[in-house]
Amino acid sequence: MGKRRNKYNKTLAACYLGFITQAITANFTPLLFLMFNRNYDISLGKLAVIPAVFFITQLIVDIICAQVVDKIGYRKCIITSCLCSAVGLVLLAFLPEVFPDPFVGIILSVVVYAIGSGLVEVLGSPIVEACPFDHKEAVMSLLHSFYCWGSVGVIVISTLFFKFFGMDNWKILSCIWAIIPLFNIWNFATCPIEHPNHGEKGMGLLALFKLPLFWIAVVLMVCAGASELSMAQWASAFVESALGLPKNIGDLAGPCMFAVTMGTCRAIFGKFGHKMNLPHFMIVSGILCFITYMLASLSKAPVVGLVGCVLCGFSVAIMWPGTISICSPKIPKGGTAFFAMLAMAGDLGGAAGPALVGNVSQIFDNNLKTGLLAGSFFPLVLIVMIILIPIASRKSSGENSIP
């Protein structure tokens, strides 16, 4: 049995790299926002469209995955994920110069690599869930933490690259980042991949839509995605423009530390989570998240605003994987469709949150503090949804859909 588990370590490593690739596609472009603003004269309002397009594209991919992944096969889909991520990152280096409006080239590149990101987001968790590992909750928590460590790596390496080689060479770095998903194509082509639920057909979308708990999970994921990405996507621009820190220092102190605290929290919960009450932990996280948004948006002291930005990473860490951990055991036959719909809801929040922050900021004379104040709405809704889970769970059980 030990040898059987060991052969799945390559599968796990491939999924780790898949989540690192997702971190690259989600975090590299936001580091370039103010450069796009200065060099291409793209307004903050238009820049807010970039993360929105990224997550809306992922959302569409999530919906499609719910219908077609079981028919096409997990291996073909996950290899396509790596290919799209690599191609999108390479296109980002070239397309802005091809079109008269550089923004069009950026958006097209974002769409391509967002397709790859959306696929790995839907497929990574069920692929690992299907592997015969002990202590799967810890394995899953560690899997999600690799997104955080990937984010740290992207920010640190990109910052060092910009310092020594200059922002003007960002296109070279974009191509360098594409090497990781290209390498991972070989990993996924050769590793063992099992089908979730041992090949049994999961619940269809119509059956899921009838469950009150499903809709609670959807709203939770929307709020989790929005709470996380509203701060993460704008952290670089926030610490540079609102707090007045130099870009090199700001990226390390803002988005990088955000990712560090987020990954640290997930690692801690992965080790000690079995001793904690997850719903209570998420409620406390929601309260802390609201406080961090208040610190970032209302404080006049740059240090306090930076502390709010950094601690926000710790507060949002468990929201996304925690929602999956709470709800998936209560809907055990959810299958691919359930994972896809949760990913879709998270992406919807990831699109809506940063877009709200960017557009509110533009309305108030490009004031990102005011934009982040609007983002504090999402953790409050998340707290309410967690409180409602027991009620929704009982009603769902009454539908005889959840054993």
Image (cartoon, rainbow, N blue to C red):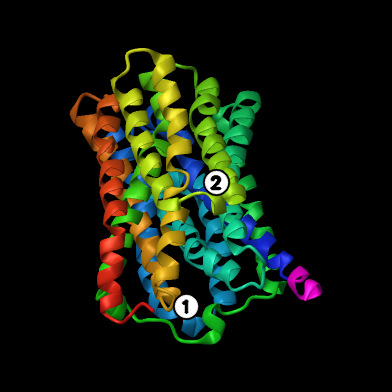
Q: Which amino acid, mark 2?
A: Arg
Note whether 351 is above or below 163 in the view shown: below
Q: What residue type is labelled 1?
A: Val
Closer-to-camera residue (311/135): 135
Q: Label 1 vs label 2: CA separation?
A: 28 Å
The one of 71 and 91 positioned closer to us in this rendering: 71
Nearer-the-camera pick, 157 or 196: 196
Residue count near mark 2 (Cα–Cα under 10 Å), binned few <14, some 14–19, many ≥20:
many
Q: Which residue is drawn at 40% across and 64% down?
A: 327
> Which mark is drawn over residue 256?
none
First in sequence, mark 1 or 2: give its number: 1
What percent of the width, then of the height, locates residue 317?
47, 44
Residue appearing at x 53%, y 64% in the figure: 125
Q: What element carries label 2?
A: helix
The residue furthest right is 3
Task: Answer yes or no: is residue 125 visible.
Answer: yes
Image coordinates for residue 28, horizontal then vertical, percent: 51, 41
Question: Residue 159, percent across and down?
Answer: 59, 29
Residue at the location (46% across, 35% down)? 32
Quadrant of the rendered image containing residue 17: bottom right
Q: Residue at x 42, y 29 (%)?
A: 309
Residue 3, magenta (yes or no): yes
Read off the residue under disc 1: 69
Furthest toward the left, the residue is: 363
Residue 282 located left or right of residue 348: right
Residue 134 appears at what percent x and percent y?
Answer: 67, 66
Q: Is 280 covered by the magenta stretch?
A: no
Give the magenta-colored segment's residue range: 1-7
Dot 1 alpha-carbon crowd within 10 angstroms: few under 14, some 14 to 19, many 20 or more: many
Q: Which of the image's four quarters has the N terminus?
A: bottom right
Tag of residue 266: 2
